[in-house]
Amino acid sequence: MRKLFPITLFLSVCFSFAQSQHTINNTIDPESKIGLDALLTAVPGGFNSIRDVVERRNFTNALFASMQSPEVNPNIRITDYKIPGLKSAPDIPLRVYTPKTAGQKNPGIYYIHGGGMIIGSIQGEESNAIALALKLNAVVVSVGYRLAPENPYPAAVEDCYTGLKWMAENCDKLGVDLDRIAVYGGSAGGGLTIATTMMARDKNFPKVCFQMPLYPMIDDRNTTVSSHLIKNIGIWDREANIEAWNWYLGGKEADQYAAPARAKYLQLLPPTFIDVGENDLFRDEDLEFAQRLIEAGVRTEFHLYPGAFHASEIISPEASLSKKIWETRYIALKKALYP
């Protein structure tokens, strides 16, 4: 019996893992799963199956470009800038989306794209940035920060903060109300949203009125239940997350600006909105972070969406759940930007 025990234990673990994967698949919203299945048909194994990071970037850039509207929106004005990077860093690209209905002092949204710190671009999330600008009559400034592994930490957060600082310093030119600047981003962009907002707090400029980190990537330690549970889902799972954090940190020890879950001091952060899906590996770290924000006296709104997976509202935008997710965000942003 002693010799059989390790085998029995191994089989038990395998069965438990298979059972957990079966449970996850059964809890994904059926409408949202249509988009996921289509993606996995096109790319068996998901994004992480493309091992070379440059090829992965090229594929995801092409994929997300195909999801953008090919028509120029007549209601928006788009302006590109390049601003000096910090110290000897290269110039940072910024794209500004201004509604043609905008006045001289409009709310501003600083937009940080996602992609695990290793992929993603301004162009890949342009439709979302335009939608925010038009629905909220806000000036949206989207930043193209440097990506890992070529540019490990602190490159991304330094670029993001530098862009936010430029936005605040150029409020008059941009038509932005300095007192109504929100920071917004999903996934890695969500983690960078929190890190950038913390940096603005610690440097005493600019004052951010609201932050919206969506299913933020904030903990390099990968020790939560959901970080172990969400595997092989095809969008962003444990293997992809560990790989991305290793590339992003580049052998450095993570601090609060690299991994905001490590921050000990959360006081004086702006009102915060966080949402995350039930089937997202970031679920537990985001839930814990929201709880800590509340304990620190930060006004916090948190939504956990049953049936949603990582970025499901982007992969399956026509699903009823996705529409609910977007509408809830717009309502929260409108309340924050038009108090």
Image: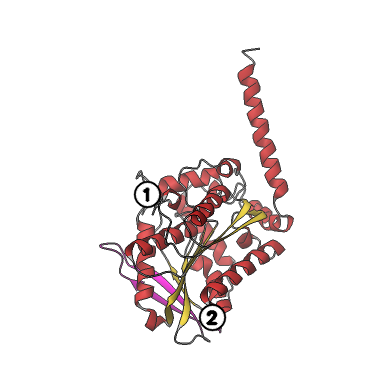
| Placement of 45 over or under 103, stated as above or below | above
Please name the amino acid that badge 2 sits on. Answer: Asn
Give the residues drawn in magenta, as a range: 71-99
- Which is more N-terminal, label 1 or label 2? 2
Identity of the residue drawn at 54% across and 44% down: 238
Q: Is residue 73 magenta?
A: yes
- Determine the secondary structure under disc 1: loop
Q: Position of residue 256 (x, y in %)?
A: 39, 52
Q: Camera-side residue: 211 or 187?
A: 211
Q: Which residue has dot 1 on it?
A: 255
- In this view, the residue farthest toward the left is 88
Q: Residue at x 48, y 63 (%)?
A: 113
Q: Is residue 45 magenta?
A: no
Relative horizontal placement of residue 196, taking residue 134 as reference (left or right) = left
Q: Position of residue 4 (x, y in %)?
A: 64, 15
* Percent x, y of residue 234: 60, 49
Residue 328, numbered label: none
Instruction: Calculate the distance from the C-alpha at mark 2 to the C-alpha at mark 1.
Output: 36 Å
In the displayed structure, 182 sits above or below 173; it is above
The numbered mark at residue 137 is: 2
Which quadrant of the figure contains the N terminus?
top right
**In the rendered structure, are the residues bearing label 2 and label 1 in contact, judged by CB atoms less than 8 Å apart?**
no
- Classify mark 2: helix, strand or loop: loop
Q: Position of residue 187 (x, y in %)?
A: 52, 57
User: Hey, what amino acid is under mark 1?
Assistant: Asp
